[in-house]
Amino acid sequence: MYHDRGRLSYGVVGVYVFLILVAGFLLPRSGLTLWALGVILFLFLFYLVRYLSTTYSLDDTHLRAWRLAGSRRIRLESVRRIEHGSLRELSPTGFLGSWGWRGRMWSPEVGSFDAVYTDPAKGLLVTGEGVPIYISPTDIDEFARELSRRVRSYTGRLEADIGDPRGSQG
């Protein structure tokens, strides 16, 4: 089994912690009812834990992208493309797509895709069964090599495969 975490940003973690502190210290003075304050604190804490829980794993049969409340699994034998990706390049049509429950987003380039990520700037776009998935492992190149090696054991070379040292860089 091969594991990797999502690449974390201290800035993102810092913003969540700041929002939790602001909600905990300033909002009680604003006259919000206790239940409303609890809901706000819960949401900030939930999204922080969700961000921190993002992990990726490869076993003999599947790629798994996991996070609290929103995961995806792809059979390795169905993978057709492994490419570098960026949410900025994919041009998703909305900010809330990445905060949604499933992380389903849309791009004019690839159509619908899932996003189980922590870094919108650098990641992998993996196309297999269902819609493509955007992921952001800590070590993109190493993860792509290991994913490619495992996929090639099922299918041979792919049309676009940044992890294959002798294959197409598509």
Image (spheres, grey):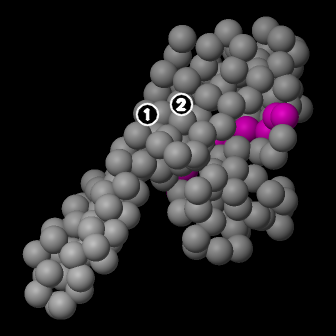
Residue 146 locus on image (x, y percent): 61, 19
Question: Compared to 122, does 73 lie above or below?
Answer: above
Please identify the quarter of the rendering in which residue 41 is found: bottom left
Label 2 element class = strand
Question: Compared to 79, does 45 lie above or below?
Answer: below
Taking the spot 69% from the left edge, 50% from the top edge, the residue there is 114
Disc 1 marks a residue whose amino acid type is Arg
Which residue is identified by label 2? Answer: 56
Label 1 element class = strand
Q: What's drawn in magenta, residue-wise?
A: 121-129
Front-lying residue, 158 or 167? 158
Label placed on residue 109? none
CA distance separating discs 2 and 1: 6 Å
Residue 149 locus on image (x, y percent): 70, 15
Q: Quadrant of the C terminus?
A: top right
Q: Total marks drawn?
A: 2
Please identify the quarter of the rendering in which residue 27 is found: bottom left
Taking the spot 37% from the left edge, 55% from the top edge, the residue there is 46
Please identify the quarter of the rendering in which residue 60 is found: top right
Which residue is identified by label 1? Answer: 5
Q: Is residue 126 magenta?
A: yes
Q: Quadrant of the N terminus?
A: top right
Taking the spot 70% from the left edge, 68% from the top edge, the residue there is 91
Question: Compared to 154, does 166 lie above or below?
Answer: below
Residue 107 locus on image (x, y percent): 77, 64
Disc 2 marks a residue whose amino acid type is Tyr
Q: Are marks 2 and 1 in contact (CB under 8 Å)?
A: yes
Taking the spot 81% from the left edge, 28% from the top edge, the residue there is 79
Front-lying residue, 107 or 50? 50
Earlier sequence position, callout 2 versus callout 1: 1
Left or right, 104 with reference to 138: right
